[in-house]
Image: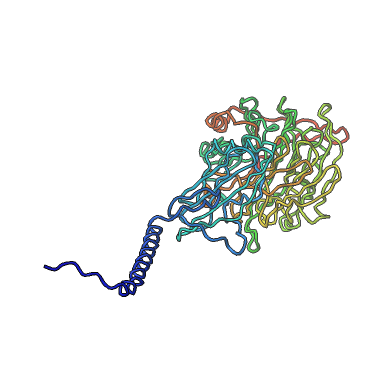
Amino acid sequence: MIGPKPPQPHARTQKRRPDIEGARSSRRIWLACGCLLLAGVRSVASPAVQPDPLSGRASPPGVRETAPPSEAPRLPRIAPDYLEVVIPPNLAPLNLAIQEPGIEYQLRVSGSRGQPLELRQSHPHVRFPLREWKELLGTNRGGTLRWHIAVRNPAGEWIPYAPFESRVAQEEIDRYILYRRLRPLFSYYKHLGIYQRNLETFEEKPVLRNDTFEHGCVNCHTFLQGAPDRFAISFRARSGTPTLLIDSNRISRIDTKMGYLSWHPNGKLLAFSANTITQFFHLAGPANRDIYDARADLNVFHVDDRTVEKPAAIAVPDRSENWPCWAADGRHLYYSSAPTVAFRDERSFRYDLLRIPYDPDQNRWGEPETLFSGAEHRLSAHQPRVSPDGHYLVFTVTDSGSFPVFRSNSELFLLRLDTRELEPLPINSNQADTWHCWSSNGRWLVFGSKRLDGVFTRLLITHVDPAARFSKPLLLPQEDPTYYDTCLDNFNVPELVRGPVQISEEELARAVNTPGNTTGPTGRESSAPDRAPDRSTISDNPYP
């Protein structure tokens, strides 16, 4: 039997004590290393929570934020471009596509008041909830919105982009807009119609489509000072070239062709053009097709007695008059006028911009006044539209010709009527900018532009302050932010109205398709006593 070891001499015991302490120290080192290794493994399996790149709050596990870059972050690429725009406080959400590669997207829109809008999603197409968007605009009316965007890349890193701002205006835009939608075409109108859009939502409804009357042409439309129940629409169909007048939602068909239209504010007069046009094609140059307007005359339709007047002061021999527009007070009629030219001289055709005084109480015309000389500026003036306060006139100019939407060099000009100062608008692009209209409060201008691709006309909205400073235009928003990428329609002839058109498409189509329900215009003497009256009826020439 083995007994206990005898005690060792003291000197031997003292000699071994350092070895015991070294062993204990070694075990402590290994234990510390093991703890560190275990902590590292657990860290990989479950990383620490990182701060949110936009709000500073904690992000979910698995998210890592990049270290602050040495250079300032750049602005994000988004479409449509909403950087530094001015937003009507009653406009539908500015849905957008974030054009940055990533696997997760975060966006926050905030103002100085109210709750911010925050979205976090796996795809780049952002659609804001309508109720929350309206609340954000309403609480920040007259203020500024700040947009923050961050994108998580495939490595799990969040890339924050530089924030940008947009301003919410105090003034609202009219609730509805009507426009014509049509495909690019040359001779056959297969799909064409007038539609109304609720600008506070994304609801769009047809007012009248051409498949309801044998695919004819729905021409121009005009409203009486933005009233949705007082308007006129002209047509070209197999049953004729009628014009429909809608008064308090009652329809009457006028059996004559009217081109461009403009209501007098008293609702008793409708100025219109009668055009003789031909479409032709260029063999070379930036414009492949064009319009030759051999003869255009201005007429005034008197609604009460269904008569047509050709004012002698306007109907100058050997000149073409076009593009009528009444001033908001009804005391002036603005229009374009040019010497008639032969087809071979079409490139030298340039409209002047004129206005003529009018006394609605006496139905008396004054003498025309030239506001813009086409020959002097070597430009052709079209589409005059006067602001509701009567201070400003916006019109379209081209190098020549009579149909600006076909010219890529079409631009919008502003004429200050009190000082006669003339200036091109800063909202112009390098493509055609045409077809504009004012809001009823004069604080917004909607116009058509081909700036996105040079082919399709889209509608843009710009804010106009009391000093006639125009903001950066914003594209008419759609529910799908990629809508315009695949839309093959042109949008033109915009008209802002204060409410929806209530009369049905079926009623309008029935009036177009029923030639028996017509009123033929009769001649009316000119109001100028020193000029011979013209009692001739109106030409039924086709109009594009």
Q: Would you say residue 193 is visible in this rendering?
A: yes
Question: Where is residue 501 shown, x and y percent of the image?
Answer: 59, 31
Q: Is 459 above or below relative to 268?
A: below
Residue ranking furthest to the left: 1
Q: Which is nearer the eye, 159 or 345?
A: 159
Q: Which is nearer the eye, 101 or 243?
A: 101
Q: Which is nearer the eye, 264 or 274?
A: 264
Q: Which is nearer the eye, 463 or 319?
A: 463
Task: Give the quarter of the image for residue 227.
Answer: top right
Question: Where is residue 325 shown, x and y percent of the image?
Answer: 75, 39
Q: Is 471 above or below relative to 3?
A: above
Residue drawn where x is 75% and y is 28% of the image = 266
Residue drawn where x is 52% and y is 30% of the image = 506
The quarter of the rendered structure image containing the N terminus is bottom left
Residue ranking furthest to the right: 530
Q: How is the image coloured?
A: rainbow
Q: Would you say residue 196 is visible in this rendering?
A: no
Q: Is residue 362 left or right of residue 504?
A: right
Task: Give the quarter of the image for residue 46.
Answer: bottom left
Question: Where is residue 198 shown, x and y percent of the image?
Answer: 58, 36
